[in-house]
């Protein structure tokens, strides 16, 4: 036991002050309102890169920033940089439809995604940044008998894996989300569905910003507008990276570059089993609350939720070709909205406000890679395809573990690169929101 | 009331046709040609909506698609109501009913208005910093946030209107019917090019068409008169298509554009019936001319958002085009010459302009001099610092600007006005240009982003004010010059026009105008719809949000339904000023399609409801319907699922059908199975390569079951293939896999094995297949084809014969998916129903029973036959299915072979197909249920149930499952843990019925 | 929505085609003689180039022929098309 200092109000207040400094709360908001919001601190610094780091994370999206955060927080590394080509959270983190769920079929996936979901449940408090994780439930609809079998199989597997999952009859689907067209006379009627109540959505930008702010506080350098031009190797070991801001030395590089993973792998002289394809999404104009959950449909190829702002957030499918343009083809959007109107004919007069594309890196088995590589000190976190956002906290945590220990965590051991050689794939095609 | 703000003389509004409409329940009148906005203004209604966040009163601010405030709910009908429609774009029609949005209980008394007083607590991003305690309360906070956000209301019943698509190819597409667009179109058609001219208004001519002033002359005529004559000539040109009320929503690569045409929204309700509401034009243009014009910028100063603060050019349009005074006592506030045009128009219409505040020290142009001469008071080098009034502006305060424009000096002067016109210069509409991949450059002298001619995608050009030309002579001369090069024209009529106009000589721009108060005490709005202010942008910068995209997302500037048409430039300007960056280096945010919001209905067109997807029906479908079949969707096919009789449940039907098939005879429509005709001298070799087993030695007239793998070794498809002749096979595939199998085979044939002489043709639709099984099947076939030798010697199991049924050629295969003695008849589809009915007739005495997919599944499960896609899931090898026998060990190679010998695929503890029997024979397992050995946690799942039925023939429940190391576990007891109970099962062989296959030859 | 110049049919809208991924990955003639690593390389590893990529396309809603396309994946510009078995017209 350490010696107790005499109780001193002023001393306690100074501790309180220190702890509360820069802490976000309704009190800090009121305090700052009184000074016209002129005294808010920077959410993160804007440092120039140092000459050398213990670990460099390439990619300032949610996964990369989370990785840096957990490296600093759990593995006590402080000399870390996150290198971002553009602005943090500007890639798929800021472009996705923010669905979070963990009802995956295989044990390995369930372990990974539920690990993430558990972190999501306390993330706002952990980061002192409201990521608006909203557990409004996710429904997956079944439209044919094989869908029913597959979704029931998943439900049973989820339940035994300790993941909340329920099978809903068509009537129960209707009750949970009354605007779904559950008429049995439509082309592909709803035959039921699964519900994960703990699932939901979060505010995508806040995730990147919250992790960035917390990582920065622990000393992580977040370097934006800095493009990686090369990865320097000495034999089997990485030495550092060439960037538009010069050479930066490091012995450990974690690449979390989503659609651009192959480009970086190429710089390091390795190949990955990835294809980068356009994935599109769109939002409607904002309206008053009309759908209070997330509904996904694999067979009819549509998923929709409503943001807190009131926009319907709709995810489309991927195109069949590789593209780095962040644009997809119009027919994909058209097909998606067809499906939306099939399931929600009341939305026909709603208007598309914005439509955009991201570049998703897709693995042959629709599962990610969180892995060491044949190059010492080079780690990849990629292949999240259409569904990486939901894994952000878990992915960051496990990738940090893998980098810090040079060994995967139990939960990401299956998501190694060797599985493509051995054949031990984690085939989650059935669980991806849209069949490919 | 009606005429009090309406001036009489007008060319565009038909004052003989009075139209009644309702706004917020109040009956009002306007005229044919009005928009809802102009009619409301004529009725002296400015307050039309409440803002998104602070619920501040907001009025009509513009006259076009950039309108941020005046967005209303149109219609009451729960299926036809439409949220978020801009009042400035609604053409008035008889019976129009519109409502203010985002206010409760009413526009005049809105509870949400309290947010305005809480606004110090609601700066940009406040929600990221709060609502975190206690953690479990977020859902409750969120409930309130959600209900106070949102604008209008979604319809709650399905849309009754029709939407349509039309494809069009043209040589030249001209977007925008203003003067530069019209000139472009005229030049294009003169060259003989097939031209399409699109404009979002109901008239052509843009803003020039109502610019009736001596200052602006073309060939000695007022510009509007000259332009009107040009427009009149357009009607008679055969190679020109003009589309009014049509807005280009998206400009994709390779000159692919989407344009939405509004067809009925301007009609009286009773004229709309049966007509298409909107048509989406899908345009492929060889060349595109962007002539989308420019929109006026507001000015950013404190409380610049009050109802009655209107863009100066909109005031001009309301008076010149609609004949509507936007106030009785109007003042103007500007940084450029355009407000002087407005002053002249107002003056001409007898509306006194109280004062013009010009931030420039001087403005010695023809326009300003004329205004000065007319006696209107002009304050030069002054700025408005604040406004007063709540639901309508009442007065505003003015102060002298310091030399550098960074502060205000001297005394405050207050002017009373009920309308303040503001003009912050012009922004070229470059949205479509950038959507198409074009890059912008910044022009410093007037702070505009314009298309960079060196970074313009090929086969398109921007002209007129969308290209940064704002004055009449520049617009005409540059358009003509550039179009001439773009289209490769010779001399033309427009090259030497005599153009007279005013030229702006002085420029001054201040993105955020100074005030006498600290900025924290002001409310200078940038994004009127989303309520973001210059303060929010500065706060974002203070907090380290540096990139324009970050600022946009953090403050929500530019993310409203107007997509920042009015706010983006100011946000950029303030960022540049605050951070000391050049705006050109800062760049813009991405302009994302669509240009203006597009209804889902228009995007989807007719492809909803019964046109959502193709429905494939077999040639025998009508018979099934007549015989009360229930159908199952399998891919796009409708397949009979079961044939209930006399109110049977599915279970009862299936039990009856299954028993009948085993005891006497059943008949199945198997037409949906894929059929691929394979011909060519290398056909056998081809099959060797695509199937796991060997085919070379298959005798002509024999059938063989084949298993097809993916290259990764996993089972992909299966089916029976028959050798019809030396070099002729017919392959059958699963129903769902047919198209993919054909594609895959074509792929290998064309790309990997071009040396093989093989031709593949799908004949799935051309042939229909009916399968007759059961101990009496032979007798039935005998009746249908009396002369066919059905002896086991002549026609053994797994063989085929050509034959005729009533002169109809058919192929008969003796193959079985049920384990019963069974025949499959393949006939041309147009005879199929007849042949089917003959079989039914012939089978009557044997109680031939039509059965559906469910019974088929049951019967094959009794025999342990797999269904790919049900018992397999893309992770199982043939060996996992206990089908090692089908792998041609001697074969050098086949698709997927190499993958079968990887370290993971040779593991012995893979999941393998087994049979399951429940300890309680009446207990039917749920398909998809998991199997475990122990219930100790963490529970280890060993596999799952793939197929499960109650077998009437065995009088017990049977199931197939995949189980880890299943091959070795015969006899092992496992548990199926369900939510409410645990079911005990035993692993068995996969074949439950007739293990010796005696019935095949019975 | 690009336009692809099918070498058999001429210019058609992209929606008539489907992409078959990277071109010139020849199926090994003797798969059984490859190591697991080599086989994985053929089966799964892709260049996934940002820039000029050689790829396979199929005129699935047309002549159903496979052919090769040279496309810049950074801007979707198509530089050339050529038939299966032909040498790429561009390096």
Image (cartoon, coloured by chain):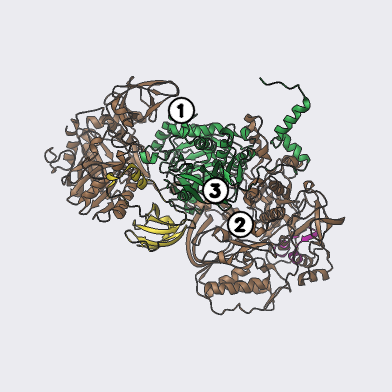
Chain colours: A green, B brown, C yellow
- Name the spot of residue B836 as percent of width and height, x first: 25, 42
Mark 3 is surrounded, within 10 Å at the Cα level, by few (under 14), some (14 to 19) or many (20 or more) other residues, namely: many
Could you tell me if the residues under marks 1 and 3 are in contact, i.e. CB atoms within 8 Å? no
Q: Which mark is residue B927?
A: none
Q: Quadrant of the C terminus of chain A?
A: top left
Residue nearer the viewer, A179 or B78: A179
Mark 1, residue position: A161
- Taking the magenta stretch, the answer to whether it contains residue B322 is yes
Task: Indicate the secondary structure of the residue bearing disc 1.
Answer: loop
**Which chain hosts label 1?**
A
Q: Quadrant of the N terminus of chain A?
A: top right
Could you tell me if the residues under marks 2 and 3 are in contact, i.e. CB atoms within 8 Å? no
Mark 2 is surrounded, within 10 Å at the Cα level, by few (under 14), some (14 to 19) or many (20 or more) other residues, namely: many
Please give the range of residues in magenta.
Answer: B318-342
Could you tell me if the residues under marks 1 and 2 are in contact, i.e. CB atoms within 8 Å? no
Mark 3, residue position: A282
Mark 1 is surrounded, within 10 Å at the Cα level, by few (under 14), some (14 to 19) or many (20 or more) other residues, namely: many
**Measured along the vertical axis of the image, is residue A104 above or below residue A274?**
above
């Amino acid at each position: 036991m350490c010696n107790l200092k005499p109780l001193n109000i002023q001393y306690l207040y100074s501790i309180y002050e220190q702890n509360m400094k820069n802490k976000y709360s309704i009190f800090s908001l009121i305090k700052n309102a009184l000074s016209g919001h002129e005294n808010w601190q920077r959410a993160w610094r804007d440092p120039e890169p140092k000459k050398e780091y213990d670990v460099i994370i390439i990619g300032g999206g949610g996964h990369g920033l989370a990785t840096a955060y957990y490296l600093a927080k759990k593995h006590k590394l402080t000399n870390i940089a996150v290198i971002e080509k553009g602005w943090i959270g500007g890639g798929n983190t800021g472009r996705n439809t923010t669905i979070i769920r963990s009802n995956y079929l295989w044990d390995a996936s369930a372990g990974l995604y539920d690990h993430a979901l558990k972190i999501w449940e306390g993330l706002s408090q952990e980061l002192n940044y409201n990521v608006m994780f909203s557990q409004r439930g996710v429904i997956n609809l079944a439209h044919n008998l094989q869908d029913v079998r597959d979704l029931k199989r998943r439900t049973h597997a989820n339940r035994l894996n300790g993941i909340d999952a329920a099978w809903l009859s068509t009537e129960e689907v209707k009750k949970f989300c009354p605007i779904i067209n559950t008429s049995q006379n439509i082309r592909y009627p709803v035959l039921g569905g699964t519900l994960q109540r703990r699932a939901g959505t979060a505010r995508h930008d806040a995730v990147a910003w919250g992790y960035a702010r917390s990582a920065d506080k622990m000393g992580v350098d977040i370097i934006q507008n800095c493009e990686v031009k090369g990865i320097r190797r000495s034999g089997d070991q990485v030495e550092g990276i060439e960037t538009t801001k010069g050479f930066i030395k490091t012995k450990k590089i974690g690449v979390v570059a989503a659609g651009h993973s192959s480009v970086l792998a190429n710089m390091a002289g390795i190949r990955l089993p990835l294809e980068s394809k356009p994935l599109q999404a769109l939002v409607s104009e904002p309206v008053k609350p009309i759908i209070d959950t997330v509904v996904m449909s694999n067979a009819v190829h549509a998923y929709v939720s409503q943001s807190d702002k009131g926009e319907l957030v709709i995810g489309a499918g991927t195109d069949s070709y590789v593209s780095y343009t962040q644009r997809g083809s119009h027919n994909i959007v058209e097909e998606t909205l067809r499906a939306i109107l099939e399931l929600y004919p009341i939305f026909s007069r709603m208007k598309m406000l914005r439509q955009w594309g991201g570049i998703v890196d897709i693995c042959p088995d629709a599962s990610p890679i969180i892995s060491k590589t044949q190059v010492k000190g080079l780690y990849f976190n990629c292949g999240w395809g259409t569904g990486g956002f939901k894994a952000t906290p878990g992915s960051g945590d496990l990738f940090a573990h893998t980098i810090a220990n040079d060994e995967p965590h139990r939960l990401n051991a299956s998501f190694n690169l060797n599985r493509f050689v051995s054949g031990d794939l984690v085939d989650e095609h059935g669980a991806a929101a849209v069949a490919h | 009331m009606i005429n009090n703000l309406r001036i009489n003389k007008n060319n565009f509004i038909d004052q003989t046709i009075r139209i009644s409409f309702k706004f917020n329940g109040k009956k009002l009148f306007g005229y044919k040609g009005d928009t809802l906005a102009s009619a409301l203004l004529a009725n002296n209604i400015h307050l039309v909506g409440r803002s998104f966040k602070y619920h501040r009163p907001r009025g009509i601010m513009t006259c076009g698609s950039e309108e941020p405030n005046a967005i209303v709910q149109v219609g009451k009908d729960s299926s036809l109501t439409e949220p978020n429609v801009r009042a400035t774009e609604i053409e008035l029609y008889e019976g129009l009913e519109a409502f203010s949005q985002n206010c409760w209980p009413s526009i005049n008394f809105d509870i949400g208005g309290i947010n305005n007083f809480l606004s110090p607590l609601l700066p940009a991003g406040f929600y990221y910093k709060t609502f975190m305690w206690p953690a479990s309360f977020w859902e409750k906070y969120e409930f309130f946030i959600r209900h106070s956000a949102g604008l209008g209301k979604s319809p709650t019943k399905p849309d009754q209107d029709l939407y349509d698509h039309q494809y069009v190819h043209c040589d030249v597409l001209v977007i925008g019917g203003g003067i530069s667009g019209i000139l472009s179109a005229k030049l294009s058609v003169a060259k003989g090019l097939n031209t399409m001219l699109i404009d979002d208004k109901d008239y052509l001519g843009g803003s020039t068409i109502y610019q009736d002033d001596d200052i602006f002359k073309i060939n000695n005529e007022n510009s509007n008169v000259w332009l009107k004559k040009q427009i009149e000539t357009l009607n008679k040109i055969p190679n020109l298509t003009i589309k009014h009320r049509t807005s280009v929503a998206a400009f994709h690569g390779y000159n692919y554009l989407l344009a939405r045409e509004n067809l009925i929204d301007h009609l009286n309700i009773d004229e709309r019936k049966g007509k298409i509401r909107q048509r989406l034009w899908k345009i492929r243009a060889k060349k595109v001319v962007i002539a989308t014009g420019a929109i006026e910028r507001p000015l950013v100063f404190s409380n610049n958002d009050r109802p009655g603060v209107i863009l100066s050019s909109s005031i001009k349009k309301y008076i010149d085009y609609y004949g509507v005074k936007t106030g009785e006592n109007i003042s103007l506030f500007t940084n450029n010459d355009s407000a002087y045009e407005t002053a002249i128009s107002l003056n001409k219409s007898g509306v006194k302009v109280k004062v013009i505040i010009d931030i420039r020290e001087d403005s010695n142009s023809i326009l300003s001099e004329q205004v000065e001469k007319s006696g209107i008071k002009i304050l030069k080098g002054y700025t408005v610092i604040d406004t007063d009034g709540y639901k309508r502006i009442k007065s505003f305060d003015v102060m002298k600007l310091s030399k550098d424009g960074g502060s205000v000096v001297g005394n405050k002067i207050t002017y009373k006005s009920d309308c303040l016109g503001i003009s912050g210069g012009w922004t070229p509409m470059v949205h479509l240009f950038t959507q198409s991949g074009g890059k912008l450059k910044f022009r410093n002298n007037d702070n505009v982003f314009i298309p960079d001619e060196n970074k313009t995608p090929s086969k398109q050009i921007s002209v007129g004010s969308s290209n940064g030309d704002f004055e009449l002579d520049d617009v005409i001369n540059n358009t003509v010059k550039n179009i001439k090069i773009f289209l490769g024209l010779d001399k033309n009529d427009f090259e030497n026009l005599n153009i007279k106009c005013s030229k702006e000589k002085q420029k001054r721009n201040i993105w955020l105008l100074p005030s006498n108060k600290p900025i924290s005490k002001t409310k200078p709005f940038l994004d009127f719809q989303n309520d973001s202010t210059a303060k929010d942008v500065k706060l974002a910068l203070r907090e380290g949000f540096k990139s324009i995209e970050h600022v946009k997302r953090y403050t929500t500037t530019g993310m409203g339904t107007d997509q920042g048409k009015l706010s983006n430039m100011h946000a950029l300007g303030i960022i540049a000023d605050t951070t000391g960056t050049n705006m050109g280096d800062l760049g813009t945010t991405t302009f994302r399609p669509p240009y203006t919001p597009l209804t889902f209905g228009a995007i989807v067109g007719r492809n909803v409801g019964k046109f959502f997807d193709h429905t494939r029906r077999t040639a025998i479908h009508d018979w099934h319907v007549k015989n009360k079949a229930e159908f199952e969707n399998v891919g796009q096919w409708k397949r009979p699922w079961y044939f209930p009789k006399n109110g049977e449940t599915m279970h009862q039907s299936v039990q009856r059908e299954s028993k009948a098939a085993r005891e006497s005879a059943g008949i199945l429509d198997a037409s949906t199975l894929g059929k691929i005709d394979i011909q060519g001298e290398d056909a056998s070799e081809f099959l060797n390569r695509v199937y796991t087993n060997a085919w070379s030695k298959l005798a002509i007239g024999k059938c063989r079951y084949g298993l097809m793998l993916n290259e990764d070794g996993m089972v992909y498809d299966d089916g029976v293939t028959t050798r019809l002749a030396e070099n002729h096979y017919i392959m059958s595939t699963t129903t769902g896999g047919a198209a993919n199998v054909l594609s895959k085979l074509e792929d290998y044939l064309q790309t990997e094995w071009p040396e093989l002489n093989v031709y593949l043709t799908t004949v799935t639709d051309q042939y229909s297949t009916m399968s007759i099984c059961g101990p009496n099947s032979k007798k039935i076939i005998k009746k249908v084809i009396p002369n066919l030798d059905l002896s086991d010697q002549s026609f053994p199991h797994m063989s085929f014969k050509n034959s005729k049924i009533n002169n109809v050629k058919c192929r008969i295969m003796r193959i079985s998916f049920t384990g019963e003695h069974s025949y499959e008849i393949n006939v041309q589809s147009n005879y199929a129903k007849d042949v089917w009915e003959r079989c039914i007739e012939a089978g009557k005495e044997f109680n031939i029973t039509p059965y559906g997919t469910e019974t088929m599944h049951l019967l094959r499960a009794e025999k342990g036959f797999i269904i790919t896609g049900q018992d397999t899931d893309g992770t199982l090898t043939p060996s996992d299915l206990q089908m090692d026998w089908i792998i041609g060990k001697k074969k050098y190679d086949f698709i997927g072979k190499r993958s079968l010998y990887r370290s993971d695929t040779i593991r012995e503890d893979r999941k393998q197909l087994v049979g399951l029997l429940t300890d309680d024979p009446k207990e039917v397992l749920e398909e998809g249920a998991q199997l475990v050995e122990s219930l100790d946690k963490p529970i280890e799942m060993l596999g799952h149930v793939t197929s499960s039925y109650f077998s009437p023939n065995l009088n017990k429940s049977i199931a197939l499952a995949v189980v880890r190391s299943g091959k070795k576990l015969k006899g092992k007891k496992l548990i199926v843990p369900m939510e409410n109970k645990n079911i005990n099962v035993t692993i068995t062989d996969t074949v439950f019925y007739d293990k010796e296959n005696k019935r095949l030859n019975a | 929505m690009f336009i692809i110049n099918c070498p058999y049919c001429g210019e058609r809208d992209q929606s008539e085609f489907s992409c078959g991924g990277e071109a010139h990955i020849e199926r090994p003639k003797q798969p059984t003689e490859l190591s697991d690593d080599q086989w994985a390389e053929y089966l799964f590893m892709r260049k996934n180039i940002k820039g000029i990529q050689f790829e396979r396309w199929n005129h699935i809603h047309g002549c159903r022929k496979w052919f090769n396309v040279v496309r810049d994946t950074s801007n979707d510009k198509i530089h050339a098309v050529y038939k299966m078995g032909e040498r790429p017209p561009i390096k």
